[in-house]
Amino acid sequence: MNEFLANYKYPIIGAVAGLILAILLFTIGFFKTILVLILMCLGGFLGFFLKSNGILEKYLK
């Protein structure tokens, strides 16, 4: 089972992401889904930025 997951990790992640995107499109609509995706990307960028600069670790200590 671990070999299967190791060999097909990215296709499985892509399929799950596609499923989530399809569910969002059908339940909340196109424009709200685009807004959710934009906010997710901004949040990911902000988290990456805070981690790479070490700002968050300084603040939490």
Image: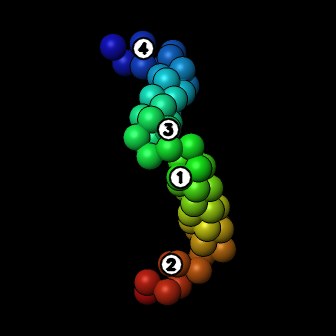
Q: Nearer the viewer, residue 47 or 60?
A: 47
Q: According to the image, label 4 marks what residue?
A: 3
User: Sequence-wise, which precedes: disc 3 or disc 1?
Assistant: 3
- Amino acid type at circle 1 is Lys
Q: Describe the element under mark 3 as helix, strand or loop.
A: helix
Q: According to the image, label 3 marks what residue?
A: 25
Residue 1: image x %, image y %? 33, 13
Residue 5: image x %, image y %? 42, 19
Residue at 44% over, 46% down = 28
User: Sequence-wise, which precedes: disc 2 or disc 1?
Assistant: 1
User: Sequence-wise, which precedes: disc 1 or disc 4?
Assistant: 4
Q: Nearer the viewer, residue 20 or 47?
A: 20
Q: In the rendered image, which quarter is residue 60 located in?
A: bottom left
The answer for how far apart the CA atoms under marks 4 and 3 are is 33 Å
From the image, state whether disc 1 or disc 4 is nearer to you. 1
> What number is the disc on residue 57?
2
